[in-house]
Amino acid sequence: MKNIILAAACVYALAGCANAELRDSLGIQDPTVLQTGFGAQQSAEAGAAVEPWAHVYGQIEKPREVLVSLQARLDQLDQGKANYFGYKDQCWIDAAKSELDAGDRWGFVEESIGEAARLTAGLEGTQPLSPDNPTLRTVAALRPDLTASLQAVTADPRFVYCPQAQQQTACAEVQLMHAGHDAWIRQFSRAKTKVDAVESTLGEAQKSLESCVVPQVDVSSPTPGPKLVALPVDTLFAFNRSRVESITPEGRQMLDGLIADVKGDGAVSAITVSGFTDRLGSDAYNRRLSQRRADTVQRYLLAGGVTAAVQARGYGRASPATDCQMRGRRALVACLANDRRVELRFLHKEDQG
C-alpha cells in the first residue's frame, strides 16, 4: 500500500513539473494567471468581473443572435470587408462561436463579440478603426516575441498590397488572444496548441509578404474612359489625420455629393480610391498614411450606400503633381498641397465593354 501511494505521489509530481514547463513556454506576462488556491487574487488585475465590465458586456443576453446579426452586417460589406480589419472581424466572430459552442461562460464570448462589433462599426464608417489589440479581462498576455513579430509584418510596406498576408496576420493576432484566454482559465495545453499554430501562420504570412511588391504606379496621365475626381487632402481631412471622425465638414459635403451622384447615375460599376501624399516624410510613413486615407474614403462611400465595388490603394508620394523648389518649410508645405490628395476613378459599365 505504501508503495502504491508513493508511486501516485511521484506521478502527481511529474505531472506538476510537466504542467509548469508547459506554462513557462507560453511566456505569460500576467503573474496573477499563475496563482492558485487560497492565495489567488480576486481583483480587476486578476480578471474579476468588476461593475464597468458587467455594464458593457453583461448586456449581451443572447450572444448567438448577436453573432448572427454581426455576421450579416459583415457580409453586407462585400468587398469592403476584404482587408485586414475585415479579416480580423471575421476571426473574432469565429472565435466567439467556437467558445460559445464549447460552453465557455468566463466572458470571452462577450469580449469577442465586443471586438467584432467594434470592427464592424469601423468598417461601416461609424467609428474609427485601430489595428491595436485591446487588453481584455479574460485574456492573459502571452509571448511578447510573437506579438512583436506580427506587428513587424503589419508595418512592412508590402503589407497593404498583400491581402493574403493581411488575412493570415489578422487571424494570427486573434488566435494569440484566444490562446491567452486558454491560459487565463489554466488550460495551458490548449493555449500551447494555439500558440504553435500562430507561429506557423506567422511564418506563412512572412512568406506571403515575400511574394508581394509595392507597385510602381504611374498615374500622371488619366486613364481614358473612367471619370476622375481629385479631392485635396487639406480640405478633406484635419491636418495629418486619416480617420473617419477627422473628415472635415467640407470633406463630408464633398463625399456626400459624390455619393449622391453615384446613386443617381446608376451606371457606375466600380470605384478606385487612390491616396497620395507629398514628398515630406519617409516612404513607409507616407504609404501607410495614404493607405489609411484611401481606406477611410472607401468606408465612407460604402457606409453612404454606394453599392458599386470600391477598391482602396495608397501610393504615398508616387505621383507628385507639383514641382516645388523653395527652401522655407512653410512655403514648401503650402506649395505641395496638390500632391496631398485622394483620387476617385469611377468606372461605368460602358467603359468595360
Image (tube, rainbow, N blue to C red):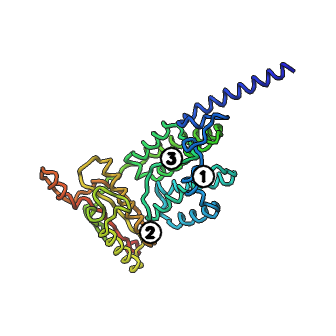
Q: Which residue is mark 1?
A: 95
The residue located at (38%, 74%) in the rendering is 259
In the rendered view, tell whether residue 14 sits above or below residue 50. Answer: above
Which percent across, then down, holds residue 266?
A: 42, 79
Q: Amino acid at mark 2?
A: Ala
Q: Secondary structure at mark 3?
A: loop
The quarter holding residue 75 reads: bottom right
> Can you say which quadrant of the picture contains the C terminus?
bottom left
Asked if the residue at tag 3 contacts the one at tag 1, i.e. Cβ–Cβ closer than 8 Å, the answer is no
The circle on residue 257 is none
- Lower position in the chain sequence, tag 2 or tag 1: 1
Q: Is residue 226 visible?
A: no
Q: Nearer the viewer, mark 3 or mark 2?
A: 3
Which percent across, then down, holds residue 210?
A: 43, 44
> Can you say which quadrant of the picture contains the N terminus?
top right
Asked if the residue at tag 1 contacts the one at tag 2, i.e. Cβ–Cβ closer than 8 Å, the answer is no
Q: Which residue is mark 3?
A: 135
Q: Is residue 32 left or right of residue 303?
A: right
Q: Which residue is mark 2?
A: 303
Which percent across, then down, holds residue 141?
A: 53, 40
Q: Nearer the viewer, mark 1 or mark 3?
A: 3
Q: Is residue 22 visible?
A: yes
Most foreground residue, 180 or 60: 60
Q: Is residue 119 left or right of residue 328?
A: right
